[in-house]
Image (cartoon, grey):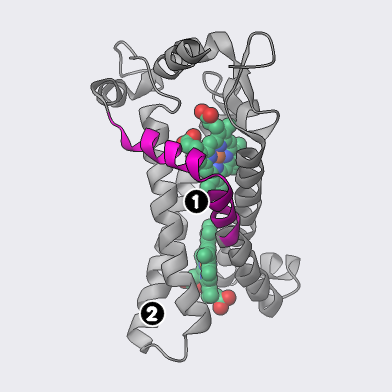
Amino acid sequence: MSTVKGKVLKHAEQTRTMHWVHLICFIILGLTGIGFHWHVSWINNLFGGPANASLVHRWTAVVFTAGPAVYILLNFERFSKFIDTISSFSADDFKWLKTMGGYLPFLKGEVPPQDKYNAGQKLLGWVVIFGCLVFILTGYPMWFWRHDVSPAFLNFCYNVHFWDAIIMILAVAGHFFLAAIHPKSRVEFSSMMLDGYVDAEFTAHHNGRWFAQLSKTE
Ligand code: HEM
Ligand code: HEM
């Protein structure tokens, strides 16, 4: 289960590296994208002017796409397990959603035991996968085929890409709040951002179903 007493290894080194790469790319893409859309000159200047900002956006997008692709190829079994976990919605997950895991003070009730990811994180996992696919499906045509596709299709890609960016920035802001600031969940911060470990006692309580499986395989 773990080589550190009282701790559980939750995220392996390659997962943490991929998450960092994706996070840094996301911030650069979000900033440059906001810079083009609203013609924010200080953002464009930060990246060497509008033409350079556009180049930075496009080549960062390549890393944003290639990073997870390489990770999936090198960690296929781990990625399949992640997909299995976020695809399985048990009665406990629906109960978790009813009480929003106890995060909202006005929603009272028992918080049921969760898998490696709670029901909210499972949903975020799907939002991230779907949102990134939409970035890819709209962003590359805007880059490579802008002179070949009809103006209406190009305009459609711009609109969908823009609204995808707004939804994803809001989703990541919520994810950041829960992972880094909220006192109840920020204890998991180090599991993805630092050494990969999370407190065993906390995990036994917050991810009871996963903890029980780990204890069985120990
Ligand atoms: C596969 C990844 C992506 C690709 C290939 C891509 C590509 C592009 C391209 C070609 C443009 C047109 C502007 C230009 O010519 O430079 C653009 C605009 C934009 N991108 Fe991306 N992008 C990607 C990911 C992202 C992400 C992750 C975000 C936000 C977090 C984002 C936000 C934006 C925004 C807000 C615009 C401006 C749209 C508008 O003017 O309405 N992009 N992107
Ligand atoms: C803004 C700073 C961010 C912080 C502080 C952060 C932190 C974390 C932490 C601590 C976890 C592990 C949670 C757990 O084990 O229970 C995690 C998981 C995850 N992160 Fe992030 N993250 C950030 C940005 C992002 C971005 C930009 C993306 C993708 C666009 C992303 C996608 C994910 C996904 C898919 C997971 C696994 C499923 C989940 O926990 O919902 N994260 N993150």
| Position in image of residue 133 (x %, y %) | 42, 60
Dots 2, 1 in contact, CB < 8 A: no
Circle 2 residue? 155
Q: Verify whether residue 73 appears in magenta.
A: yes
- Picture quadrant of residue 42: bottom right
Against 71, residue 37 (above or below) is below
Residue at 49% x, 11% y: name it.
215
Q: Is residue 32 visible?
A: no
Circle 1 residue? 169
Mark 1, ligand 1, within 8 Å: the answer is yes
Q: Secondary structure at mark 2?
A: helix
Mark 2, ligand 1, within 8 Å: the answer is no
Q: Which mark is residue 85?
A: none
Q: Callout 1: 10 Å neighbours few (<14), some, many (20+)?
A: some
Against 14, residue 109 (above or below) is above
Whichever of labels 2 and 1 marks the residue nearer the N terminus, that label is 2
Q: Which residues are magenta?
A: 66-89
- Horizontal arrangement in the rendering, residue 6 relative to residue 121 (left or right): right
Q: Verify whether residue 218 appears in magenta.
A: no
Q: Secondary structure at mark 1?
A: helix
